[in-house]
Amino acid sequence: MKFSGQKKIGLFPMGVDDLHVHTRLSYDGKGEAEDYVKALLAHGGNRVGFSEHFDYDLFLQGEDVLPDLNEYTKVVNGLKERFPQVKILKGIELGFSSAAAPFYRELCKRENFDYVILSVHTVGNRGDCYYPEFFKGLKKEEAYGMYLSAVLESVTSGVEADIVGHIGYVARYAPYADRALRYCDFKELFDKIFDEMLARGLCMEINSSGYSPLNGGNGAGSADGGKNDGGFADGGNGADAGSATLPPVDIIEEFAARGGKFTCGSDSHTVLSYTKSLTTFPSLLSSLKLK
Ligand SMILES: [Zn+2]
Ligand SMILES: [Zn+2]
């Protein structure tokens, strides 16, 4: 059954609920889910969406990264009982590859996720675009074009997702002097991605892992990001990233102009990062000046 993020979880454009949160159940996350909920309550919030990694793309390459879904369900159900005043959502972040897509199509039918984030981390046979090796011998246009083609493939793959995760991930660790990803440089690919997303009711995630209000919103990064995610692993390489958010603002605006819907995600991998994002989200959203 296809479920729409908007209908199922009551999202609305520019909702401030954080739907991209990893705990220790993700191979690169830390902290107990319970401690995230306690942080949310201390902040006065009442809704959180966990999105543990499910990277079958990496699993197919021999990496031991899959979460224990039974334990995940048990943890979330236990928290729902203990904290009935909090709406706790059991989401998942699927790391797309064409080889993993058939498995994901089955997984989404089999498992009862509240929502699905579809993210591109690995591109073709060049591996995760987090690593410098990915870019070896590639011009910026080639590397980014390959990445965006993979995003397009992911949204047309038949995997029943609700949200496209951190579009622009490729730019975050790219080795180019100007590594900004711009709509105008890949207009044709972006237009195709937008059309397919709109046709399927897919939300675009505004991933805040590069946002820090202390330095004008472009740099140090609020998230501690896992190696496989949008966030800055070392919190230190964002100064010239060209964007505080993934995707960059010009891409968000183009999608908004077409009537696209958005969700928010901090991509936190620790309770500390999650706690920070609870206070920075509102300023991030108002800085975007979107309706
Ligand atoms: Zn990710
Ligand atoms: Zn993530």
Image (cartoon, helix red, strand yellow):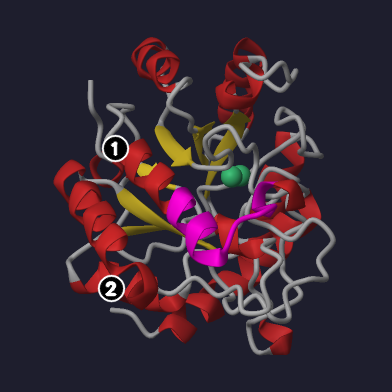
How packed is label 2: few (under 14 Cα within 10 Å), some, or many (20 or more)?
Answer: some
Q: Seen from this angle, which residue lies furthest bottom?
A: 216
| Mark 2 within 8 Å of ligand 1, using the beta carbon | no
Q: Main secondary structure of the magenta part?
A: helix
Instruction: Identify residue for label 2.
Output: 254
Which of the 4 image quarters holds residue 162?
top left
x, y percent for residue 235: 81, 66
The residue closer to the viewer here, 46 or 160, is: 160
Q: Amino acid at mark 2?
A: Glu
Examine the structure image and report whether residue 233 is included in the region drawn in magenta.
Answer: no
First along the sequence among labels 1 and 2: 1
Residue drawn at 69 percent across, 61 percent down: 173
| Relative image position of residue 54 (x, y in whole percent) | 58, 26
**Residue 40 sits above or below residue 208 on the image:** above
Left or right of 12, for residue 145? right
Q: For the image shown, how many numbered marks are present on the structure?
A: 2
Q: Nearer the viewer, residue 44 or 114?
A: 114
The kind of secondary structure element at disc 2 is helix
Tell us which disc is closer to us: 1 or 2. 2
Ligand 2 lies under 8 Å from the Cβ of mark 1 = no
Q: Quadrant of ligand 1?
A: top right
Q: Position of residue 255 (x, y in %)?
A: 27, 67
Crowding at dot 1, Cα within 10 Å, few <14 / some 14-19 / many 20+, comes out as few
Tag 1 secondary structure: helix
Please determine whether, in this image, residue 219 is positioned above or below residue 1: below
Q: Residue at x 46, y 20 (%)?
A: 99
- How many angstroms separate mark 1 from mark 2 (CA)? 25 Å
From the image, which quarter does the C terminus lie in? bottom left
Residue topped by disc 1:
8
Q: Is residue 139 magenta?
A: yes
Q: Are marks 1 and 2 in contact (CB under 8 Å)?
A: no
State the extent of the magenta-drawn residues as a range: 134-147
